[in-house]
Amino acid sequence: MSITKEAELTGMKRVSEIVGTTLRMMREYAAIGMSTKELDAYGAAILKGYGAKSAPFETYGFPGFCCISVNEEVAHGIPSENKILKEGDLINIDVSAEFDGYWSDNGGSFVIGSDICNHQPLVDASRYILRKAIAKIRSGVLISDIGQIMESEANKMHFKVIRNLAGHGVGKSLHEEPENILNYRVRSNKERFRRNTTCAIETFISTTSTMAVVLSDGWTLVGNKGGYIAQHEHTVLVTDEEPVILTESNGIFM
């Protein structure tokens, strides 16, 4: 979305605060022994309290209000009464919503309880890479250069990136141009970030896999070679200087 007037910026700030706060509260609420269905219901109630609508539910008919992925699941995990959170699980919550005609998107992976499965280094890498990538975004910067930062930093830490998932523009709808803010460089992509546009920037950092594949439920994504994936995501406003992180309320950089 291209911000052309103050009312649009106010709208994006408001919906971004809503999704960011919802993500933070869901992460704090998550507990060992809880089902992902209960966690999703908690997030849905927060969104409803703000008067916001779940983006995946409204846009795609997703069977839930927030995407909650556990362990080997990459993204788009369906909330279920049968999926119970356990000590050391790697959990990803992705919250996107519409409020007053504006849309925003954010997500984050975390370990619940003690890190008995050693997922924390992956989570820390994903968060670090997102922070570093966002810090380099400016008006005029090649989108592919940000992808190169993500992949090179992942490789330094002996991780991989998922190559068929990407960040995207967001604002007047959930997915807008640019559609492919990838986690690696595509040399042929000469598209650049533009001032006063809003984008969802996200990492997909992997231990083993390089592609995401869809399970038979038609939604849940897992890695093509197994392993685990961490994701972190912020909606940002591109400027001539460092971007404004609109979803800062999610607290993933704290």
Image (spheres, grey):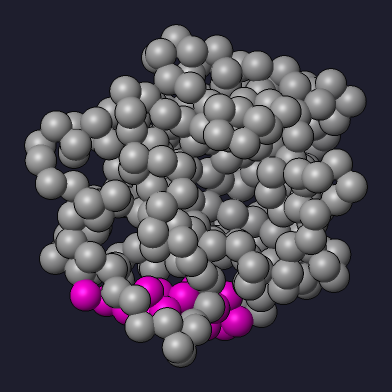
Residue name at image x 62 percent, y 36 percent: 60
195 left or right of 47? left
What secondary structure prevails in the magenta region? Answer: helix
Whether 208 is drawn above or below 85: the answer is: below
User: How far from the left and from the top, in percent, is residue 241?
Assistant: 15, 64
User: How far from the left and from the top, in percent, is residue 45?
Assistant: 55, 12
Residue name at image x 38 percent, y 47 percent: 170
Whether 37 is drawn above or below 198: the answer is: above
User: 155 or 65: which is nearer to us?
Assistant: 65
User: How far from the left and from the top, in percent, is residue 106?
Assistant: 47, 43
Q: Which residues are magenta?
A: 140-156
User: 30 or 134: which is nearer to us?
Assistant: 134
User: How far from the left and from the top, in percent, is residue 239?
Assistant: 17, 60
Q: Is residue 163 visible?
A: yes
Residue name at image x 37 percent, y 74 percent: 143
Residue name at image x 61 percent, y 47 percent: 109
